[in-house]
Every structure is written in C-alpha cells, then in structure tokens.
Amino acid sequence: MIGIIFDMDGVIYRGNTLIEGAKEVIEYLKSKNIPFVFLTNNSTRNAKMYREKLLKLGIDVEEERIITSGYATARYLQKHFKKGKVFVIGGKGLVEEINNIGWEIISVENAKERWREIDYVVVGLDTKLTYEKLKYGTLAIRNGAKFIGTNPDTTYPSEEGLLPGAGSILAALKASTDIEPLVIGKPNKPVFEVVKEKLTADKIWVVGDRLDTDIAFAKRIGAKAIMVLTGVSTLEDIEKSGIKPDLVLPSIKELLEYLKVHVDD
C-alpha cells in the first residue's frame, strides 16, 4: 500500500487559490482508502486553521491528516528536550503549538526584562517580524538558548510571487549569532518522526513543489519524489540542481491519471 505526503503551498493551492485538480485527487484517494497526510513547512497556522482554509477551498480533511512544521517542532521539543522557557519568533499557529505542550512562552514585551531566562528560541515564518524580536532572539541565543527552526524555506509562494520565508529569518539570526539552528521541517529527518505517527504505508510518495525541501526530503527518507511545477521550483532549477525528482508533473491535476494507472483497484 502506498501512502502519500502532500506539501500544501504551491501544490494544493497558491495563496488563497485552489490549484485545478487538487480536490479530485483527494477525493480519489479517499474513495480508494489510500492513506495520505498534508505536511507543510509553514508554521503560521495550526492544523485547525489549515482545515478551515481547505474547507473554504472545497477540500474536506480531518485535522489529524494535517502536520505543520510548528506541530512537528512542538512534538520534537516535548520528546527530545527538557521543558523550558521559549521565545517564539513566528505566527499564531506556532505560538499555539508551543502553548499546547505546556511550555512557558516569554513574549517580546517581557523579553526586555527576562531574555536571560530564555532556554529555547523557536523560529518560524513571522509576517510581523520586528527588529525587537531579532534583538532578543540574538541575545538569548548568544546567552546559550537552544536555537530551533521550524523549517529552512527561504521563500514561499503567493499570488504576488515569492515572499520571504522562515529561512530568511533564520539566516538573519545565524548571521547575528554565528550559531546553526536545529531545523525540524523538510528536508530534515526530525519531521519524519512525527509523520510516521500518522502515516502507515509500505511505500511513500512525496508530492511537492520545492527541490530543496520536498524533493530533498523524499530522497532522504527513501520515498518516491514527485514534483509539480505550480509552486517554487522550475524545470530550469531541476537541470541546475543535483537533487532530481523521480517524476515531474505540470500540476497535481496530472497526478490523478498517474494514480489510476499505478494504484491497483
């Protein structure tokens, strides 16, 4: 039995626009009882918020099928590290995931007095990034706080084009601290620990739009790497890159025919 890991931004939708064929692929998988999960490196929303977004676009999936890099980061912290005080540079989704594991969050307002108490600086995409956040993140990391990144994506796709991603914020903190973060999300293996809790399959396919995260992740976990051209990476990028997908499709729409041929009834 195959199990499929789908990226979301650039595969299922771009911004708030559903990509043609996405709904039909998900309906087909449900009808055939083929296990699948959504795995996004975007940590600004949690699973509940993503479920609501997908519902608005006409795709109905359970929260349990949605894994964000924020959820994976919180689970990984809980499993591998001692409980401590966290400074979060990230969106509401990431803050909620850290709250869910019961670890204290030191806010940017409180960091002025308490940055020396910070044990972990956890960084995701933050569309409300300020110099103050970078300042206290830098001070805490230089003071010995563990530096954790939800994902390394330097950009993410929107209707306007490519926008700065979490990796751009990590790059700023790396430059100001000379410390490499532990990055949980794709293409790194820590996130696969969490995926395996929710996806049981003999063979895994990864469907993504980025060579450096989705396709590299597929290669790292020994999965079939399927790239669609509706997101970040292009055919030209594949030619230049050492990371090669096993299959390239114009969009998720073409995956339906491929599935029908390759999945036994």
Image: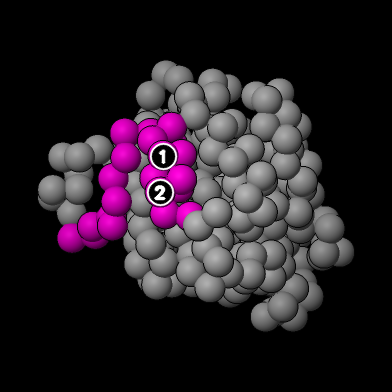
Which structural element holds mark 2? helix
Q: How dense is the environment of label 2, judged by Cα within 10 Å: few (below 14), some, or many (20 and up)?
A: few
Q: Amino acid at mark 2?
A: Val
- For residue 83: magenta? no
Q: Is residue 239 above or below residue 158?
A: below
Where does the C terminus fall, quadrant-wise? Answer: bottom right
Which structural element holds mark 1? helix
- For residue 261: magenta? yes
Identify the magenta region. Answer: 242-263
Q: Is residue 229 above or below residue 108?
A: above
Tell me: 53 left or right of 220: right
How many numbered discs? Answer: 2
- Asked if marks 1 and 2 touch (Cβ < 8 Å), the reply is yes
Where residue 69 appears, as percent x and y from the top left, is 60, 55
Query: Which residue is denoted by mark 1 in the rendering?
Result: 257
Viewer-proximal residue, 245 or 77?
A: 245
Query: Which residue is denoted by mark 2 in the rendering?
Result: 261
Where does the N terminus fall, quadrant-wise? Answer: bottom right
Where residue 124 appears, as percent x and y from the top left, is 57, 50
The colour scheme is: one colour
Viewer-proximal residue, 32 or 189?
A: 32
Residue 231 visible in the snapshot = no
Tell me: 18 left or right of 236: right
Residue 64 visible in the snapshot = yes
Q: Amino acid at mark 1?
A: Glu
Where residue 163 appears, as percent x and y from the top left, is 42, 31
The residues bearing labels 1 and 2 have C-alpha atoms spaced at a distance of 6 Å
Q: Is residue 46 above or below residue 152?
A: above
Question: Measuring 73% from the left and 35% from the top, which residue is drawn there?
Answer: 60
Q: Quadrant of residue 17?
A: top right
